[in-house]
Amino acid sequence: MERGSIASVRVAKSRQQRKLAGLKRVEVLVPANQADAVRAYAAQLREGSQSQSLVQLRRLVASAYHRFHAMCLDNIDIDPAKADFTDGAIVAAALMHRGNSEAYKLGRQISRLAK
C-alpha cells in the first residue's frame, strides 16, 4: 500500500468509529484565553456520550459473571458495577478464548462496546 492510501484508510476508520459512537467533529473559533474552557466542556460532553455505553457494558459484564463465572472468569476479579472499558476488554477476551459459542458471542458484544 502507498503511504497516502494507508492514511486515508486510517482516517476513514476513525470517522466511522466516531459515527458509531455518536460523535460529530466540530470546529469553533474562540478567544485564546477561553480555549481551555471549551476543551473542558467538550470533554464533559464526550464523557456523557460514553456513559450510555458504559451502562450497557456493565450490564453485559454482570451477565457474563452470572452465566460464565465458573467456566471462563474464575481467575478474573472485576466488580461488574464498577467495570470500565478496560475491564470489559479483559472480560471479553476471557469469554472469547475460554468459553463456548454462547460465551464467545457475549464476549464479542462486550468487545464492541469496549473499543
Image (cartoon, grey):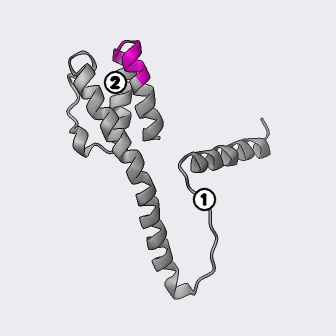
Q: Is residue 85 magenta?
A: no
- The magenta stretch is 98-105
Q: Out of 5 and 46, give the one closest to the viewer.
A: 46
Q: CA distance from mark 2 to mark 1?
A: 33 Å
Residue at mark 2: 94
Q: Earlier in the sequence, mark 2 or mark 1?
A: 1
- The picture quadrant where one finds residue 109 is top left
Residue at 72% from the left image edge and 41% from the top image edge: 6
Residue contact between numbered discs 2 and 1, judged by CB atoms under 8 Å:
no
Q: Position of residue 26 (x, y in %)?
A: 62, 67
Q: Amino acid at mark 2?
A: Ala
Residue at mark 1: 24
Does 18 sit left or right of 72 as displayed?
right
The label shown at residue 15 is none
Q: Position of residue 77 (x, y in %)?
A: 20, 33
Q: Compared to 77, does 31 lie above or below?
A: below
- The picture quadrant where one finds residue 44 is bottom left
Residue at 36% from the left image edge and 39% from the top image edge: 57
Q: Compared to 12, does 33 lie above or below?
A: below
Q: Amino acid at mark 1?
A: Lys
Does 112 sit left or right of 9 as displayed?
left
Residue at 40% from the left image edge and 33% from the top image edge: 110
Helix, strand or loop under label 1: loop
Provide the major secondary structure of the magenta segment: helix
Q: Out of 44 and 52, give the one closest to the viewer.
A: 52
